[in-house]
Image (cartoon, grey):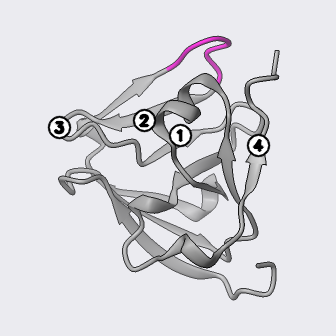
Amino acid sequence: MQDREEARYQGSCHCRAVRFEIETNFPELTMCDCSICKRKNALMVKVHESKFRLLSGAENLTEYQFHTKTARHYFCKTCGIYPFHRKRVTPDNFGINVHCLENFDPSSMPYRQAIGAGMS
């Protein structure tokens, strides 16, 4: 995946109230086994905050935090979809739910199982 050219992708929640844009070459996709990620079953790509732009819907986002209250998980207030979160270990990065990206099919891309459940 490292040889992919960096490109711009737009994404949204299901009702499209929350819209965002990222730039990435998809260096790695991850699935996390922590208590919240396991339940939301999201496939994520990590992008630096400089490569993320919220286009609309800030007022439609609701935030959820737990445990250390470092990671910030965002959900659409209308449709309940999780489009992204600010990461715990690298808070200057977002974890983007790639299933929310337009015209992107991750089905042929490998992913790494991240071990979040074992974090203290």
Under circle 1, the secondary element is strand
Q: Which mark is residue 77?
A: none
Under circle 3, the secondary element is loop
Mark nearer the viewer, 2 or 4? 4
Mark nearer the viewer, 3 or 4? 4
Vertical placement of residue 86 versus 119, above or below:
below
What type is the residue that disc 1 sits on? His
Instruction: Work out whether mark 2 precedes mark 1 in sequence or the reverse, and give the earlier one.
Output: 2
User: Mark 2: few, some, or many residues within 10 Å (few <14, many ≥20)?
Assistant: many
According to the picture, the residue beneath numbered tag 1 turns out to be 85
According to the picture, the residue beneath numbered tag 3 turns out to be 78
Q: Which mark is residue 74?
A: 2
Could you say where residue 44 lies in the image, as x and y percent from the top left? 59, 54
Quote the CA–CA distance across marks 1 and 4: 15 Å
Q: Which residues are magenta?
A: 65-70
What type is the residue that disc 4 sits on? Ala
